[in-house]
Amino acid sequence: MQHHEQQQRQHPVSYLCVGRRSRYLLSVKDVVRLKATCTWLKQLFGEAQLRDRLSHSLGSQAGLLRRAVNGQQVQLLRFDDDQFGKHDLLAAVCVVEEGDWGEVGEVIELGEQCGNCELPVTLSGADINTHANITAYVSAPRVLAQLKMVGPHVRFSDGSCLQLFQHGNGEVRAIIDEPDFELEVDPPLPAGHLYQQHRQPHDPPVRSRIEYWGIIGGWMSFGGQGFTNASVLSFAKEKIVDHFHMDRQKNQTSTRLNRGVGGGRLNDLFTESPHTLVTGWTTTMSWDGRARQLVLTDASHPFVAWIEIEDREDNDVIVFVYTTEAAVCEGVLFKHRCPVTTQMARVALGAVASFVFDGQVQQQQQQQHDDDSDDDSDDGSGDEGDGLDDGSGEGGGGEGAAAEAEGGG
């Protein structure tokens, strides 16, 4: 009876402020302002209402934050809101509604595939309070701000994680909180640079000198200016694959090709937007405008497979194909050992696939180099490297790889 009387006395404007009837007409910024200025409205934004709104906001991004795993829909991200007070709930609503989480969803999905996290990643109040307030959150590029919360949940085998460290002078460090692990956000790029042409304000390019070395089993910083990734997202995903590449045993093959083969598909990968996905890829990464990684698998696959394409001199590239797919036989060509990966790579590479897997003759390359070394193998496959990679980091691929992959037997 008392509850009914309270409802009767409720201000009629409240229906515009709270609940699904209004479809949440007020933005979260409006809610914050009203809580600060309207005494009678403060009570309308209690924990129950904020928790309901958080659930609604996450649900509106379900297409970005859910994936199919073994035929079941699995959530990528959730908040530990049962443990949240009003302050943390309001902060959670803010970070969800201040832009979509699709990019960071890619990081979480790739991290799960590579064994770096479990689904769903659950953000705590401490994760949210990485940012001092909503002003601090929105002042940073959105993907960087989101990665600051999610990164600590993406863990590597050496005990480190994909954590970002913000310092008072504006410096950002990644993975290890030491000066050599600085992540330069939005570095200056030459006029006309591919990454400048396709720069995304919410996910700008970054530069670092951070690399995982399988030989030492840990992260290190190397000299020089470092590598520039096409975006924060590209950096995060590339570090996950970098670690996985050096930490796992894989089957692999590699082929040196002219960029013009297959209708110029390889050349297009170095001239089109580095953020563009095409049929056959689940996600992509790029660095220095001279290397692309194309991930073929997703959370529904029992193995991880990806293609890496690195620019070389004389208008050539090297195409690496890596997979943890269990070989169905030994001592034969890659396409026979790893048939599922090969079929997926054929879709992703299109007309280039026959040069990588079937030994199709490269007329353009032969004319330029007057060199028929690609036909020297008895089976005519054209593979320069075809074998097992033990993850030591000595077989090529990855940032700074100077040599082509060699077969490991």
Image: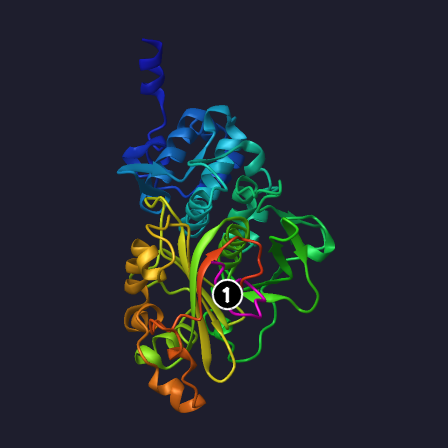
* Residue under the point 39% across and 41% down: 26
Give the farthest residue toward the top. 1
The stretch in magenta equals 396-409
Q: Is residue 222 magenta?
A: no
Q: Residue sitting at 31 percent across and 46 percent down?
A: 63
- The residue closer to the viewer here, 344 or 98, is 344
Q: Is residue 400 magenta?
A: yes
Q: Quadrant of residue 342?
A: bottom left
Q: Is residue 22 left or right of residue 54?
A: left
Name the residue nearer the viewer: 296 or 172.
296
Neighbours of disc 1 within 10 Å: few (<14), some (14-19), many (20+): some
Residue 117: x and y in percent read 48, 39
The image quadrant that residue 358 belongs to is: bottom left
Residue corresponding to mark 1: 406
Is residue 364 found left or right of 107 in the rendered image?
A: left
> What is the image's colouring?
rainbow
Q: How many numbered circles are shown?
A: 1
Q: Give the image quarter of residue 258.
A: bottom left
Q: Amino acid at mark 1?
A: Glu
